Image: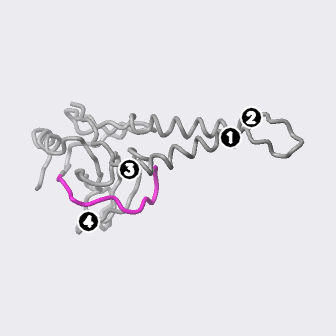
Amino acid sequence: MTFALAHPAVSGPVQVFLWGIPLLLVVLAFVPDLPESPSVPDWEVLLVAAALTALFLFAPRRLRYRLTPDGLEIRHLLGTTVLSGVGMRARSTAGRLGIRTFGAGLPGYLSGAFSFVSDEVKSVTAAASAGSGGILVGLPSNGAASPQPLRWYFLTPADPDRMLQELAVRGVVVSP
């Protein structure tokens, strides 16, 4: 069962700023370096602008959540993460993502390690389309000396209650 993502709340001025970056790079690619040099486009700058545009367009579309009989698959830009249902816990959260310590933070695509603003959970691995309004999925840590008994993943399905219900049906411990 595949779940749709929550739509990110990116305001108009932020979108204008972000899309202005590749546009500015395209314009700068046609500005000559010196007055006597020909106005030939700078292909490296055009390539960077094209890469940024592709990243802004395709990264959010690559993020998917799919429940399988064995657990949860999270498809993201660089591959697929499979979370085993054994020992999994899940709950809704009012917390929000904090500072990114490793990963990507694009509009509509937040992936990697983030601090988490919540009473109990201090850090999460995000695979989300928004910084808040999601669910936490916890898996037992591999290290016995870990300060947190669970490794938490922050997900933002469009219908978090339905996802939690489906996880409960599959034997996951779901807490309020």
Q: Nearer the viewer, mark 1 or mark 2?
A: 2
Left or right of 36 in this view: 135: left
Q: Which residue is mark 2?
A: 41
Q: Residues within 10 Å of mark 4 (few under 14, many from 20)?
A: some
Q: Which residue is mark 4?
A: 118
Left or right of 152 in this view: 46: right
Left or right of 48 in this view: 68: left
Q: Which residue is mark 1?
A: 45
Q: CA distance from mark 1 to mark 2?
A: 8 Å
Amino acid carrying label 2: it is Pro
Dot 4 lies on which element?
loop
Dot 1 lies on which element?
helix
Dot 2 lies on which element?
loop
Amino acid carrying label 4: it is Ser
Residue 114 lies, in percent from the top left, at 38, 58
Q: Residues within 10 Å of mark 2 (few under 14, many from 20)?
A: some
Dot 3 lies on which element?
loop
Task: Kindly indicate the quadrant of the structure image that contains residue 51.
Answer: top right
Q: Nearer the viewer, residue 16 or 140?
A: 16
Q: Residues within 10 Å of mark 1 (few under 14, many from 20)?
A: some
Residue 139 lies, in percent from the top left, at 25, 52
Task: Kindly indicate the quadrant of the structure image that contains residue 164.
Answer: top left
Q: Nearer the viewer, mark 4 or mark 2?
A: 2
Q: Residues within 10 Å of mark 3 (few under 14, many from 20)?
A: few
Q: Nearer the viewer, residue 123 or 7?
A: 7
Q: Quadrant of the N terminus?
A: top left
CB of mark 4 within 8 Å of CB of mark 1? no
Q: Which residue is mark 3?
A: 11
Q: Nearer the viewer, residue 33 or 106?
A: 33
Q: Tag 3 or tag 4, which sits nearer the N-term?
A: 3
Secondary structure predominantly adopted by residues drawn in magenta: strand
